[in-house]
Image (cartoon, coloured by chain):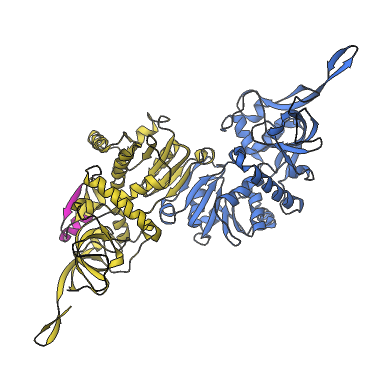
Chain colours: A blue, B yellow
């Protein structure tokens, strides 16, 4: 917007902060904070969003490392998930209004920032009565769990789902959605010192079983069977164990590879039990235009669960953008809480 | 049939030979030849089949070893594939006639025998103008290749199919069906001394590329891509290489596990290329009643190809049932030709 002053038009500017990287590498080394100026008024068809919170997810680190299939042009703003409030709408904006809460419509838009001007169609409106923590976690992890539990096998209450990496953000969402849908969940976690506390916590979320890989290989061997769906974010030998629990026409869905090892899959169940393996990538699902209505339905269901306290967000550690080095270092090693930028 | 002689009825008997096993174990050790007597006339609803040829397939050995999911009651007659001629029909037989050529309708009926009385519905009629070698190979291997090339990916002429174990009976059938359908086939075989002869032979069948696993891992690395379908009968690291050649939404079908190692599957293509893995078991396909019409269609197409010389049967080494020890020993180690019992 141009405003008259002393006979000339002066464009007003606002100052915005963002975390950018200009080269691929170790995130805590290559990401830097920069301050930019944004015109006071968004261009036609755009809205000004004040971004209020954005987590560090594992895929964000991979993207900065340059090992992720989505490679935005450099320099790029980091982060794929975040929520904000519409502050101003430009001409020609038809759907969004000031005060609406939004998240990015797709991945890779760069969410670690305080402000941005965004095309209306690049934003997706969410329920503005969600808490900040709920708003910051509705885009990536609970939807991943939701879709994997819905799109691959026709699960019925009482059916068994097994997953590894059960302590991850997706894993915790899967535990809770299984509980809400009446599926039995068997949750495989890494051996750790404070095992009893983790078992208690995950059982508190609704986990039916919480066991280590070793337990699954030994005392539980052959006891967990006829599993309909296995969720894998680990790979390696873990998938051999998970696949062996699948029943006839069971399905394993892979959404991560934390061990950095190839999946191991037994031949017999593939042939004789007709099991199948597939992958799931939330970002691609969001790219499919036909999924828009189902996305609205899913968000309505997830929001209702969240607001009722039935689906808890991850543990977050809030950080200002200025603490990016500490936050990115912590995100790479401490999986007990998720780092959350609060610009 | 009872015939009057000297005022009493005397049932006539015929002598039949069969290869049986009474315990699971090393096939060449536990299989023995026995001679039994069969009534001269088949029971109601049964036909007397003179079995004319039955190969030794790998699954037959696994069944005798007791490591196969189909476990007929012991003692059992070995062999799952074979063809014969209807010699006599019992009362109530409606479909089959003397002179018809038949194969078993399903797996596990015990085909290493000279004669048997079989329920009409346990037999499937084949084209009686096929040669003995063609008749002996129409039930298991070419149909496995045919279905894997038809049921999992919508292949179009020019599409690329990759397979390991390309020198197996299924592999050779797959090469020829790819040629007939216009698919490009990349065929991975084990390194061997007479490599050039094998390459020539498989190229003679229509193979577009014949390479070793090492070549695929090295000089062909990254050069074979956008593959639509991978056929796997090996497992282990071979599947890692095959999976890496698959394009977006490519599919790997596993029908065997010759390496006896679990499949190794890369995580990235599962998630980001949406590849999928499944298995195929011909025996299960034959169990599905809804597949009967498609089976007739498939056999008509396979038979036409065979009779035109476009789909060659495997190299067979013919053996009388009496040579069962030698035949079973050879089948376990010599994959250059298939052992064929000719009762």
Q: Position of residue A71 (x, y in %)?
A: 59, 29
Q: State the extent of the magenta-drawn residues as a range.
A: B312-328
Q: Is residue B22 visible?
A: no
Please tell me which residue is depicted at 37% across the width and 38% down the height of the picture: B162
On-image quarter of the C terminus of chain B: bottom left
Q: Which residue reaches farthest front?
A: B94
Q: Is residue A295 visible?
A: yes
Exactly how many numbered labels are in the figure?
Answer: 0
Q: Which residue reaches farthest bottom?
A: B7
Say if A191 sits above or below A156 in the image.
above
Please say whether residue B127 is one of the residues in the magenta stretch.
Answer: no
Say if B121 sits above or below A287 in the image.
below
Foreground: B51 or B279? Answer: B51
Apparent side of residue B240 relative to residue B3 in the rendered image (left or right): right
Q: Position of residue A123 (x, y in %)?
A: 71, 35
Q: Which residue reaches farthest right?
A: A6
Q: Position of residue A258 (x, y in %)?
A: 57, 42
Say if B42 sits above or below B323 in the image.
below
On-image quarter of the N terminus of chain B: bottom left
The answer to which quarter of the image holds residue A296 is top right
Apparent side of residue A288 relative to residue B222 in the rendered image (left or right): right
Please say whether residue B322 is one of the residues in the magenta stretch.
Answer: yes
Apparent side of residue A47 relative to residue B129 in the rendered image (left or right): right
Foreground: B98 or A323? Answer: B98
Please tell me which residue is depicted at 77% across the width and 42% down the height of the picture: A132
Q: Which residue reaches farthest top?
A: A7
Please tell me which residue is depicted at 47% across the width and 53% down the height of the picture: A275
Q: Position of residue A74 (x, y in %)?
A: 63, 23
The answer to which quarter of the image holds residue A292 is top right
Apparent side of residue B214 relative to residue B342 in the rendered image (left or right): right
Foreground: A187 or A307? Answer: A307
């Amino acid at each position: 917007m141009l405003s008259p002053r002393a006979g000339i038009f002066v464009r007003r500017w606002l100052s915005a902060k963002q975390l950018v990287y200009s080269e691929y590498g170790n995130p805590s080394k290559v990401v830097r904070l920069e301050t930019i100026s944004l015109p006071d008024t968004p261009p036609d068809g755009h809205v000004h969003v004040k971004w209020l919170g954005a987590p560090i997810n594992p895929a964000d680190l991979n993207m900065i490392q340059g090992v992720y299939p989505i490679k935005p042009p450099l320099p790029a703003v980091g982060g794929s998930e975040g929520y904000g409030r519409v502050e101003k709408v430009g001409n020609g904006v038809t759907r969004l209004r000031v005060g609406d809460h939004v998240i990015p419509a797709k991945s890779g838009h760069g969410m670690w920032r305080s402000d941005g001007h965004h095309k209306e169609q690049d934003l997706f409106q969410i329920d503005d009565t969600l808490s900040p923590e709920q708003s910051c976690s509705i885009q990536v992890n609970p939807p991943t769990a939701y879709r994997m539990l819905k799109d691959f096998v026709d699960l019925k209450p009482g059916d068994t789902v097994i997953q590894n990496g059960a302590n991850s953000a997706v894993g915790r969402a899967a535990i809770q959605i299984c509980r809400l849908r009446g599926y039995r969940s068997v949750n495989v976690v890494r051996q750790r010192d404070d095992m009893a506390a983790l078992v208690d916590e995950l059982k508190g979320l609704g986990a039916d079983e919480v066991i280590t890989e070793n337990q699954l290989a030994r005392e539980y061997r052959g006891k967990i069977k006829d599993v309909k769906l296995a969720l894998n974010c680990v790979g390696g030998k873990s998938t051999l164990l998970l696949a062996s629990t699948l029943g006839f026409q069971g399905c394993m869905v892979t959404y991560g590879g934390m061990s950095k090892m190839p999946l191991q899959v037994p031949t017999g169940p593939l042939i004789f039990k007709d099991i199948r393996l597939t992958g799931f990538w939330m970002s691609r699902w969001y790219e499919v235009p036909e999924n828009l209505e189902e996305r609205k339905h899913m968000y309505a269901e997830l929001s209702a669960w969240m607001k009722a306290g039935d689906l808890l967000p991850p543990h977050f550690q809030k950080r200002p953008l200025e603490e990016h080095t500490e936050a990115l270092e912590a995100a790479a090693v401490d999986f007990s809480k998720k780092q959350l930028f609060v610009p």
